[in-house]
Amino acid sequence: MPARYAQLPQSALPSSPLSKPSLHSTLSPLSPESPLFPDGLLDSKWIEKHQEFVPSAFISFYTFTSDPKLSTLHDNQLKTDINSTKSVLSQSGYKTRQIVALLSEKSIVQSPEVEERLANIRKATGLDSKTSLFFLPPQSSPVELQAFVQTIISTIYPICIEYYRDLSKHSRRKRNRGIIPPPTAPATSGTSQTLSSPGWNVRYDFKLGVFAEFRQEMDAAVRSYESGYEVLLGIDVLEAIANWSPRWNEARLLADVFAIRILRCLLWNGNSTAAVRRWQSHRERIRDFVDRRGKGSATYGWEAWEARWATIMAELIKKASFIEFAGFPLYLQAEKTIPIGERMHPWEYLHHPGYWYRLATRHLMARRILALSIPEDDRSAPGSSPASSIASKAYTYDTYLCPEPHEENPLPGHKGVDHSALIIDSLKKGITEFQQKNQSRFLQELQLLAANENMKREAWDDALRILRPLWQKMSYRREGWWNAVEEIGWALRKAAVQAGDGGSIVAVDWEMMNKGMFK
């Protein structure tokens, strides 16, 4: 487990034994050793702390021997180990609940002394027999094993809920107090400032939202996230941070995290249209912010973000596992909370993941076009560029969650971003989704795009594997879309020539020479 409080830095040692500095969490902006000191908002380590390192309940499983010769030794080792774990949990300062499950070799009926041994273990460890100590008889069937696990879960569930409710109360009290705690050491004068009161409210709202999610109270989580999101994007937080500084990017990332968690909660509750509107709202708000604060949205960095944002929506929809998408519906109807008769645009309905992968592909292609247009002077590595050129690039290109220009599109001889690989990966995901929905036209469109991308990479065999069945089974031929038929035919012929597939060349040529086909 991470340390509850940061250590006192040498520079902050008190000059007098009576003056005792305040100690705070290692993840707090008030601790000098924290990467957030003195004005950072939130660090991903805080999420990791509560999701990976500080559980609400710690469950240990032990074998409970039935051998009379080993029972005393085994029980003593068991008590020592349980008490040792209990001591570690207690010293950590966290209120993690200890749970012990004993897997026995014989039942209490077969071995009457088991009850006495269990009582001895309970007494020596201080575990509650109803909520902290569980016993599983041997030779249990799969059904009994499942029931045993379900018993543990249902027993400790209220305990875990109460654990996160206590954490929420603690954060809410600190938020309502409205007082910024004193830092362990003062910030560097002239170069840094402490986190503002609105910034602290953003932290508290985020924490309240996460704890509400852990309790599976999604409505409460959305309210907290929305509150924190609005304060974050207000004039007192993100607007007040210097443009395109590391802190600015951290705050922008936090805004994305807020939006993603809001979307997840809305999808969890089945509010599909509200989720789509929220997705669009965040995109437009960030676009406006980026356009107003400097580098604008006509950059490869913005297109990279757009592609990532569309992909996130697709992945969230897949994880939500809507039953309605199990069949062939292309989108979900608006939820009942939407007023009857309210005018809705087609894009406000929640479409299946393929729609979002297709959208992400379009942005990836736009990203490549903008990347290829980077001037040659900006494509050189920093070490080979004068200081003035490096400074100019810093204010020209948006590198939020994407590489610098010299990595996005480097000079010949240097390895950069493989845009085709990113596009093909997105196309493959979209093809899978449209295939499942039996949307033949979108499917054929993405298959042709995937084949063209493979031909750009000179992966002729891969292109041929896509184009041959597409040419044979495409619906465009029977629908009379001759321009599409011709485009696919020429693409197949080009790939077949390079791959040495004479049969496909003859078949395409035979169709192309049919004068009546294109009338």
Image (tube, grey):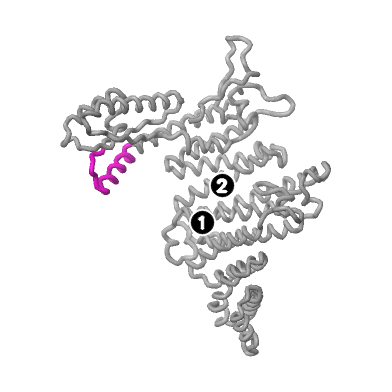
Q: Which tag is nearer the camera, tag 2 or tag 1?
A: 2
Q: Nearer the viewer, residue 239 or 341?
A: 239
Q: Which mark is residue 392?
A: none
Where is residue 94 shown, x and y percent of the image?
Answer: 45, 28
Residue for badge 1: 273
Where is residue 519 shown, x and y percent of the image?
Answer: 64, 88
Residue 265's place in the image compared with 482, above or below, is above
Where is residue 281 shown, x and y percent of the image?
Answer: 60, 52
Could you give the CA–CA distance between mark 2 and mark 1, rounded to whole angstroms?
15 Å
Snapshot quadrant of residue 138: top left
| Residue found at x 66% / y 49% | 402
Indicate the amino acid at tag 1.
Answer: Thr
| Residue range of the region highlighted in magenta in the rendering | 136-155
Local crowd at mark 2 within 10 Å, few (<14), some, or many (≥20)? many
Q: Is 145 contained in the magenta span?
A: yes
Residue 330's place in the image compared with 114, above or below, is below
Indicate the amino acid at tag 2.
Answer: Ala
Residue 88's place in the image compared with 344, above or below, is above
Q: How many marks?
A: 2
Local crowd at mark 1 within 10 Å, few (<14), some, or many (≥20)? many
Residue 394's place in the image compared with 307, above or below, is above
| Residue found at x 52% / y 61% | 351
Q: Main secondary structure of the magenta part?
A: helix
Q: Which mark is residue 259?
A: 2
